[in-house]
Amino acid sequence: MSLENVLIDELRDLYSAENQLVKALPKMAKGTSSPELKELITDHLEQTRGQVDRLKQIFEQLGKRPSGELCKGMEGLVKEGQEQLESDEEGAAKDICIAGAALRVEHYEIAGYTAAIAIARALGKDEIVTLLEETLQEEEEAGQKVLEQTEPLLEEASSDGEEEEDDVESEDEETVAAAPAGRGAGAGKQPTKRASR
Ligand code: FE
Ligand code: ZN
Ligand code: FE
């Protein structure tokens, strides 16, 4: 396969990924209770529509059609995000899960655009490089903002967690001790002692 065809495949994959997000982001915005996170996701939806247009513009330059690939990576990420939306978690804990899903999405896109830029650069397609770099920058900024918005949620959730733990311990200490590691009351506790280094 020629390098130009490799680029076209990469770009079609990104086109599929962005279009999946145009559908998924409104659901994520709706499912979050943090107004800041909701606004961030809604803003990024607008940016994502612009990114789709940018890709269309690139395909016009290449004289190719943009469709024809399904990005399975994004399909998986969107499914995982959907699971977070349907989880029984509430409030800050749920928003942290949604933010985690959003961060995964941004980093996946960053990887895809970084690869596509490298290929376009090797082919000497400078205009395409410039367009892809605009999107890459938006993805990086979006990821950064998600992290920033997660900070206050983490603070909120860790103080919620302390209260819950106190309640459980005073009610029934044995249940806590017997709870398996993983999610739930026993989460975060080390079940086995590790040798100190
Ligand atoms: Fe994007
Ligand atoms: Zn993909
Ligand atoms: Fe993005």
Image (tube, grey):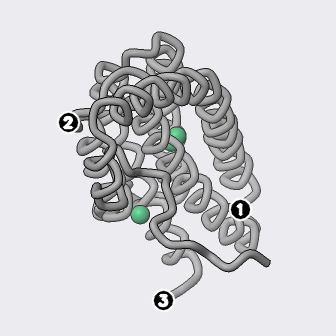
Q: Amino acid at mark 2?
A: Glu
Distance (Cα) linking label 2 and label 1: 43 Å
Do tag 2 and tag 1 residues touch (Cβ < 8 Å)?
Answer: no
Query: Which of the two discs, 2 and 1, labels the residue nearer the N terminus?
Result: 2
Characterize the local packing of mark 1: few (<14), some (14-19) or many (20 or more) Cα atoms within 10 angstroms. Answer: some
- The kind of residue on which mark 1 rests is Lys
Check disc 3 and report the residue beneath it.
Answer: 1
- Write down the residue under mark 1: 125
Which of discs 2 and 1 lies nearer the camera? The answer is 2
* Residue depicted at 45% across the width and 23% down the height: 163
Q: From the image, state whether disc 3 or disc 2 is nearer to you.
A: 2
| Residue 170 in the figure: left or right of residue 117 | left
Local SS, label 3: loop
**Nearest to the observer: residue 170 or residue 182:** 170
Mark 2, residues whose alpha carbon is within 10 Å: few (<14), some, or many (≥20)? few
Image coordinates of residue 105 in percent, x first then y, are 47, 48
Q: Is residue 17 something that shows in the picture?
A: yes
Left or right, 167 with respect to 117, comes to left
From the viewer's perspective, is residue 119 above or below residue 66? below
Residue at the disc numbered 2: 86
Residue at 44% over, 70% down = 9
Taking depth in this image into account, of 40 and 60 the one nearest to the observer is 40
Q: Is residue 53 above or below residue 197?
A: above
Residue 71: % across, % down: 34, 61
Element under label 1? loop
- Residue 45 appears in view: no
Nearer-N-terminus badge (3/1): 3
First-in-chain label (3 vs 2):
3
